[in-house]
Amino acid sequence: MKKLIAALSISAVSMSAFAGGNIANGEALAKKYNCAACHGADYNKPIDPSYPKLAGQHADYLKHAMVAYKRGSGANGRNNAIMSGQVQALSTKDMADIAAYLHSLPGSMVLKR
């Protein structure tokens, strides 16, 4: 029984790590698509105050936002000419990887008071 519980625990951890995205690949993709051009070199100081800070943001939120930009102005979508263009070439895995990378960075946002 203990072996079964240990095996299930290890499986859950490895699936959770996989579901969270690949941080190293996310970093490479963020550089490739030049996310820092708008969101700042450290992803904490965007070039325009209307652009969001991305560093430290929740990975699931970031992935959801990218998926919504890819959908466009339809149901459950977001409409922004720059972001819509940026995410079109990204796969769901690419978006999860970028989200994992950005989440791993130290952020300046207040997440809890």
Image (cartoon, rainbow, N blue to C red):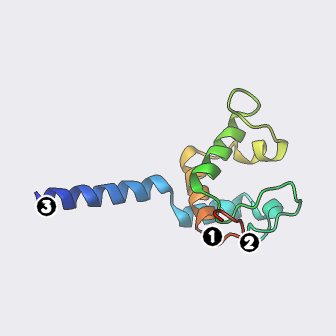
Looking at this view, name the residue that lies furthest to the right.
48
First of labels 2, 1 by sequence position? 2
In the rendered view, does 25 fall on the left or right side of 86? left
Please say if the residues under marks 2 and 3 sit with CB atoms less than 8 Å apart.
no
Quadrant (top left/top right/bottom left/bottom right) for the N terminus: bottom left
Which residue occupies 63% across, 70% down? 105
Residue lying at the far left in this picture: please name it: 1
Which residue is at the front of the view, 84 or 20?
20
Q: Earlier in the sequence, mark 3 or mark 1?
A: 3
Q: Nearer the viewer, mark 2 or mark 3?
A: 3
Q: Secondary structure at mark 3?
A: helix
Q: Position of residue 25 (x, y in %)?
A: 56, 62
The answer to whether 100 is drawn above or below residue 45 in the figure is above
Are the residues tagged 2 and 1 within 8 Å (C-beta)? yes
Q: Secondary structure at mark 2?
A: loop
Q: Is residue 78 left or right of residue 112?
A: right
The quarter of the picture where residue 59 lies is bottom right
Query: Please, what is the three-letter code of the amino acid marked with disc 1?
Result: Leu
- Residue at position x 55%, y 67% from top? 24
Q: Is residue 1 above or below residue 76?
A: below
In percent of width and height, residue 62 lies at 64, 52
Q: Position of residue 39 (x, y in %)?
A: 79, 62
Q: Which residue is mark 2?
A: 42
Say what amino acid the circle numbered 3 marks. Answer: Lys
Instruction: Name the quadrant of the C terminus.
Output: bottom right
Question: Is residue 73 toward the left or the right of residue 20 in the image?
Answer: right
- Disc 3 + disc 1, Cβ < 8 Å: no
Front-most of residues 95 and 1? 1
Residue in the image at 37% along x and 54% along y: 15
Q: Disc number at residue 3? A: 3
| Residue that badge 1 annotates | 105
